[in-house]
């Protein structure tokens, strides 16, 4: 048996009791404060580059062209009949075949004559002449109007009509200056003893430059029935135009004959109309054409110093 020393035993006992009391009475250490978890929100930062729009497909487009101006020419034997000469669209000249699809019943036609008479009528019927005996430069489309027209009128289907009708001065066919001009011209062409027959003289500013041009219509045939020609016969249109310091004489259209030809059916040319047909500010010249069992018209526009043909429609048997 082990006997403990009394003092030592008491010391150990006290140490154990103290240790037990300290363990039982231990206070919890203060806890660290708990911070709430940060809430992260997405924030859009504007870009320095501009935002591009959403790509879009182009809308389909259709080119809408205005209808052409139709040009009709009358004759000297049918007061309600006209022929389709052609047309104009955006200063482009079109032949009858190109504009015939635009012929419409009850379309209004504004008509004009060289003496200034003008009015309106309706297109009441039209047809294409397909007769094999007719020889034409293009397909011929006959148009019948609702009212009588003056002989050799011309017409347009434009609702606005002719926007530019400048004054046309009619000079006497016996004007000595231009009578001498035609005689000199024929002498220069080799006609030794010309018979001067001036039918019409017109003075008008074709190109709106402030200076008038002069148009001269002259014709002479010994045989009056139109079945033959003789030396010295002729029919032509002349234009006199001032260009800078020069005066230019142009034979716009026509023929001069130097020998006898039997069964020759010559053309006679005459001034039918002068007007700004396509609205470009310049006047066009419409020349009528007649012959035995045939007729037609030729349209000219001024290009610099020359009248140039732009449309032609002549028919004959």
Image (cartoon, helix red, strand yellow):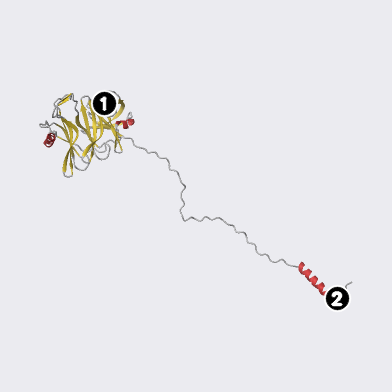
Horizontal and vertical percent position of residue 101: 34, 30
Distance CA(mark 2)–CA(mark 1): 162 Å
Of residues 197 and 134, which is closer to you in this image? 134
Question: Where is residue 289, by image quadrant?
Answer: top left
Of residues 240 and 73, which is closer to you in this image? 240
Numbered circles on residues, count: 2
Horizontal and vertical percent position of residue 21: 78, 69
Rendered position, 269 above or below 6: above
Residue found 81% across the figure and 74% down from its top: 11
Specify the label residue 135 is tagged with.
Answer: 1
The residue labelled by disc 2 is 6
Horizontal and vertical percent position of residue 179: 12, 35
- Single out the mark in the foreground, 2 or 1: 1
Of residues 150 and 265, which is closer to you in this image? 265
Residue found at the very far bottom of the displayed protein = 7
| Image quarter of the N terminus | bottom right
Horizontal and vertical percent position of residue 86: 28, 32
Earlier residue among tags 2 and 1 = 2
Residue found at the very far left of the displayed protein = 193
């Amino acid at each position: 048996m082990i006997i403990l020393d009394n003092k030592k035993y008491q010391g150990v006992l006290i140490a154990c009791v103290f240790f037990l009391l300290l363990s039982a009475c231990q206070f919890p250490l203060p806890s660290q404060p708990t911070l709430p978890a940060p809430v992260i929100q997405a924030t859009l930062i504007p870009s320095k580059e501009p935002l591009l729009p959403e790509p879009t497909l182009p809308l389909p487009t259709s080119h809408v062209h205005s209808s052409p101006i139709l040009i009709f020419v009358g004759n000297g034997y049918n007061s309600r009949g006209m022929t389709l000469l052609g047309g104009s669209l955006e200063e482009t000249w079109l032949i009858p075949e190109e504009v015939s699809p635009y012929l419409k019943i009850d379309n209004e036609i504004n008509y004009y004559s060289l003496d200034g008479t003008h009015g309106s009528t309706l297109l009441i019927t039209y047809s294409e002449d397909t007769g094999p005996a007719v020889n034409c430069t293009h397909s011929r489309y006959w148009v019948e109007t609702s009212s009588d027209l003056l002989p050799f009128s011309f017409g347009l289907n434009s609702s606005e009509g002719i926007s530019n009708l400048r004054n046309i001065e009619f000079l006497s066919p016996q004007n000595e200056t231009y009578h001498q001009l035609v005689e000199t011209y024929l002498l220069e062409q080799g006609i030794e003893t010309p018979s001067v027959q001036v039918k019409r003289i017109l003075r008008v500013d074709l190109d709106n430059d402030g200076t008038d041009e002069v148009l001269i219509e002259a014709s002479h045939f010994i045989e009056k029935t139109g079945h033959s020609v003789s030396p010295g016969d002729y029919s032509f249109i002349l234009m006199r135009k001032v260009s800078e310091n020069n005066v230019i004489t142009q034979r716009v259209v026509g023929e001069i004959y130097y020998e006898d030809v039997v069964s020759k059916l010559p053309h006679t040319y005459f001034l039918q109309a002068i007007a700004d047909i396509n609205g470009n500010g310049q006047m066009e010249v419409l020349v009528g054409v007649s012959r035995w069992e045939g007729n037609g018209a030729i349209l000219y526009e001024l290009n610099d110093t020359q009248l140039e043909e732009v449309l032609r429609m002549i028919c004959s048997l």
